[in-house]
Structures are given as structure tokens and as C-alpha cells.
Amino acid sequence: MSFKLLSPFRQACKRLYSTAAPAESSTYALSNAVAFPKVSATYPVPEGSTVVPRHLKTPRNGKAVVDFVNENLLQNYDPRRLCKTLFSRRHPNRVKPGSVLSVVSYNNATRTHTSTFSGVLLGIRRRGVDTGFTLRNIVNKTGVEMQFKVCSPMIKDIQVIKRALKGRNVGGLRDPRRAKVNYLRERPQMMTQIAAAVKQSKA
């Protein structure tokens, strides 16, 4: 009984999809009854659109796209090119972990009041426009750490008080030759010497 009831339904479906396909259409691979219209692979380029560079058409593991986006963003948000010079990985004027930096930042969105924080550079997180760094200092016998973004509009100025050079002391700290100097958190005596050197440089 069920087969007899379904047979008229199947015949109606065959009549519905058995219409002749247009001349400019491609037949479905698994059925001769269903046809889809052909779509052109090329689309007109709208006026005013940017031309895609050649290295973006065939990127290598997506790195070309990321580099292109970072370069465009750095031109707008990093006019001083600090990410390419001061916080670069291989620039000759780069700052190394262990150096003493001073950051002048705004306290409010109107940029009327500023505050200064100085400390030892514990490490740099290089992420293009999102590049940031961490400073540590001793304030009222308490260790204080602050993280800053290089391209943040709330940063007014970044000054290098002392650099960690090879074979020289920087307030009791030599060039650690490490990417991170988080071990300073467990050495309060060395941090007090660096804090005293920062105060002398300000005076």
C-alpha cells in the first residue's frame, strides 16, 4: 500500500524536474534532471578598490597577508617606527631586556594629565601592532610591574635611561643575554640597586 501511495508522488516529482535545461547551463553530475546555471568566474572590479599585491595572491602559510596588514597598521599607529627600531629584534639601536626605561603616559582620554613610570625592562612581546613590554620597579619597598603597548595612543613618550650593554653594569645589572629576565622578581637586592640608579638619573 505504501508503494502505491508513493508512486504518484514520485511521478509528480519527475515531471517537475524534467523540464529542459537552458542552453547556457551545466548539468548536475549525479542527476540528469537537475541543472544549474553557469556562473562566470571573473567579477568586475569596483572603482576605487585597491589592487591586490602579487605576494598576497600566493602567500606562504599566510605570512604574507599578516605582514601586509601589520605594515599598513604600523604606518598609522606607529609613526615614530618604534616597533622597527627601539623594540626590533635585530636593529642596532634596539633595547635589550635589563635596560632601564621611562614611560610617560596619559591618565585620561582627554590627555590633560600625565604620569611617569620607570623600571627595568623584563621582556618584549613582539606581535606587530600589538607589541608590548613589561617594566618592573620597587615602589615603597614593594615590587610593581606595568605592561605597556608600544602603539597605544595613551603613551606620550618612551625614554631609554640606561642600556644593558655587553660587559657593563646597568645599575648593578649586566646584559643578561636572555629574552626574559623574570628571575629579577626573586632578587630584591638587585632590584633595589636598579631603583636607586633610576632615582639618581632623575635627579
Image (spheres, rainbow, N blue to C red):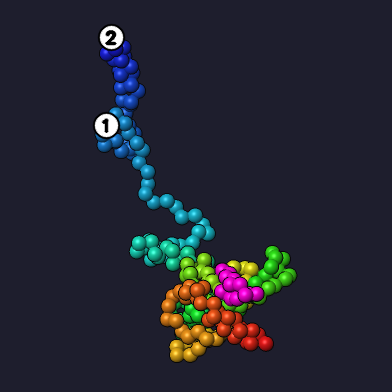
Residue 9, picture quadrant? top left
Between residue 95 and residue 16, name the one nearer to us. 95
Return the mark for residue 31.
1
- Identify the residue at image location x=56%, y=74%: 136
**56 to 114, vertically: above or below:** above
Magenta highlight on residue 56: no
**Residue 141, x across and y down, in percent:** 62, 75
**Pointer 1 local density, CA inside 10 Å: few below 14, some 14–19, many at least 20:** few
Choose mark 1 or mark 2, whichever is in front: 2
Residue 115, picture quadrant? bottom right
**Residue 126, x across and y down, in percent:** 47, 70
Which secondary structure, mark 1?
Answer: loop
- Identify the residue at image location x=63%, y=87%: 201
Q: Residue furthest right?
A: 112
Quadrant the N terminus occupies: top left
**Residue 135, x across and y down, in percent:** 56, 74
Decide if residue 58 is in sight here.
Answer: no
Q: CA distance from mark 1 to mark 2?
A: 28 Å
Q: Which residue is mark 2?
A: 1
Q: What segment carries the magenta color?
A: 136-149
Q: Earlier in the sequence, mark 1 or mark 2?
A: 2
**Residue 128, x across and y down, in percent:** 48, 68
Which secondary structure, mark 2?
Answer: loop
Magenta highlight on residue 143: yes
**38 to 43, vertically: above or below:** above
- Identify the residue at image location x=29%, y=35%: 28
Residue type marked 2: Met
Residue type marked 1: Ser
